[in-house]
Image (cartoon, rainbow, N blue to C red):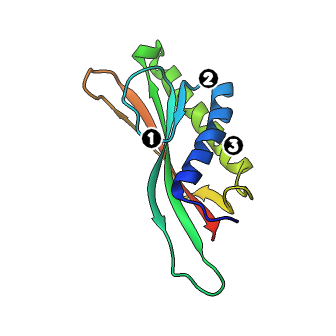
Amino acid sequence: MAKVSRKTIRQAIVSGLTTALTASVNAARVVGYQPTMQGDFPWVAVLSDGSQRPELTFQGTEAKFFLNINLFVVRKASGLTEEQAESLLDDLEALVAQYIETNRGNATNWNALEYADRSRVSWFIPQGGETYLMESIPIVVTVLL
């Protein structure tokens, strides 16, 4: 496997999730950066969360890239009830889980794609008063270098 960077991995996951999510739940956008909190919803941001690069040995080495897949649903601006917003977040999470299961081993970009920990759901109200639901799904991608 060729040398890759965390950026390459993040962009590959954005591309895969764009296909998986926009067709199924009509996600407005899937991006690889933290966008401004405005526009159409739901949307997904795949963000870098660090790297682990062990010492190089004669047998080669592996890099672990940690990322967070953040799912965002806004209620009022989308015309959703509280229950519909929660259900939409659940649907997005299930589609991400399906993507991870389907792409655990991807010879083109990585050797292993897995959960780094459990996901966390929270809600917040930024300036402007709109209520957002957010789920952060931590993943780790292993690449043999």
Q: Give the image quarter of residue 144.
A: bottom right
Label 1 to label 3, Cα distance in Å?
22 Å
- SS for dot 3: helix
**Which labelled disc corresponds to residue 98?**
3
- Image spot of residue 105 (x, y percent): 72, 58
Q: Eyeballing the image, is 68 above or below 93? A: below
* Crowdedness near tag 1: few (<14), some (14–19) or many (≥20) residues, C-alpha within 10 Å: some
Callout 1–callout 2 Cβ contact below 8 Å: no
| Label 1 sits on residue | 33
The residue located at (40%, 15%) in the rendering is 76
Give the mark toward the camera: 1 or 2. Answer: 1
Q: Residue at x 63, y 27 (%)?
A: 22
SS label for mark 1: loop
User: If the image is split into quadrants, where does the C terminus sit?
Assistant: bottom right
> In the rendering, at what x and y percent does residue 13 appear?
61, 46
Residue closest to the far front: 2
Screen quadrant of the N terminus: bottom right
**Element marked by disc 2:** loop
Residue 63 bears which disc, if any? none
Of residue 9 and residue 25, the one placed in the foreground of this image is 9
Residue 66 screen position, x and y as percent: 50, 58
Q: CA distance from mark 3 to mark 2?
A: 16 Å
Look at discs 1 and 3 and give the one toward the viewer. 1
